[in-house]
Image: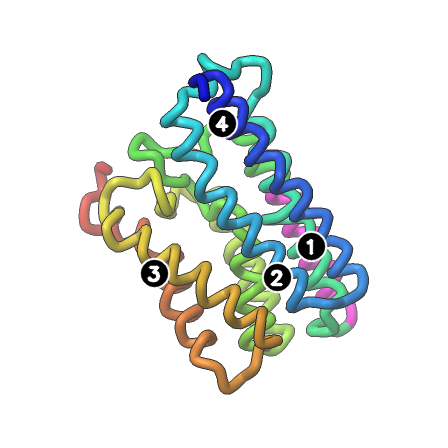
Amino acid sequence: MSIKVKALSVHLLTATGAVFAMLAMLAAVDEKWSLMFVWLVVAFAVDGIDGPLARKYNVKVNAPNFDGVLLDLIIDYLTYVFIPAFALFKSGLFEGWTGWFVIIIITFASAMYFADNRMKTKDNSFSGFPGCWNMVAVVIFALEPSFWMILIIVSGLAIAMFFPLKFVHPVRTQKWRSITLPVTLGWTFFAGWAAWIDFDVNSWAHWGLIICSSYLLFAGIIQQIIEPKT
């Protein structure tokens, strides 16, 4: 197989995320939340694989007719933002106006963040919370906090999108990557497990989600505190 075919295959792999997004959306419309999250976790796994492959096969040179960055952003907005926001709104976890507030702030703030050309730092981390609402939604569905707590979490993370706070990229941030990558794989496993068992409150998957999510949320900020100039 030639290098050009391999590079094109990476774009095709990325595009499968749109299919998984549609499958997740169909499940969400039917309020089959566990199935929806299973498809979102599959899309999350594809998103973690296609980037390293794109760099390995240099898709910008060997498959230049397709914009992999744009393709990735379109699918990321669907799977990271739009579908999780819809799921939260339809979940029944909110009362009154709070559900409308959450869906509006997530979709609006994320659209602005995804278009911000300052979203990456010099070490390939994210500047500001990177709009990973799929990860947030999984934890919320698993733990079912009060709607006021959800409102506080969503509002805080939406504000954090536009502050110069560092959030590690699971693959591209070299600092602590030997920890970050296994934690990300662990998060993917626990999220899939929690969704597969319909978010059973007695499952250890919930603790795995809490631990892995906490690391991914705060690792970059801790790096900033330790070494402010990085």
SS at circle 1: helix
Q: Earlier in the sequence, mark 1 or mark 2?
A: 1
Q: Amino acid at mark 1?
A: Ala
Q: Quadrant of residue 18?
A: top right
Q: Tell whether position 87 is magenta.
A: no
Where residue 226 sits in the image (x, y, percent)?
19, 50
Residue tagged by mark 4? 117
Residue tagged by mark 3? 215
Disc 2 from disc 3: Cα separation = 21 Å
Disc 4 from disc 3: Cα separation = 26 Å
Q: Amino acid at mark 2?
A: Phe
Q: Residue at x 55, y 38 (%)?
A: 113
Residue tagged by mark 1? 24
Report if the CB atoms under discs 3 and 1 are less than 8 Å apart. no
Numbered label tally = 4
Residue range highlighted in magenta:
96-110
184 w.r.t. 199: above or below: above
Residue tagged by mark 2? 37
Farthest residue, direction right: 30
Question: Label 2: few (<14), some or many (≥20) within 10 Å?
Answer: many
Where residue 19 sits in the image (x, y, percent)?
68, 43
Q: Residue at x 60, y 71 (%)?
A: 141
Disc 3 from disc 1: Cα separation = 26 Å
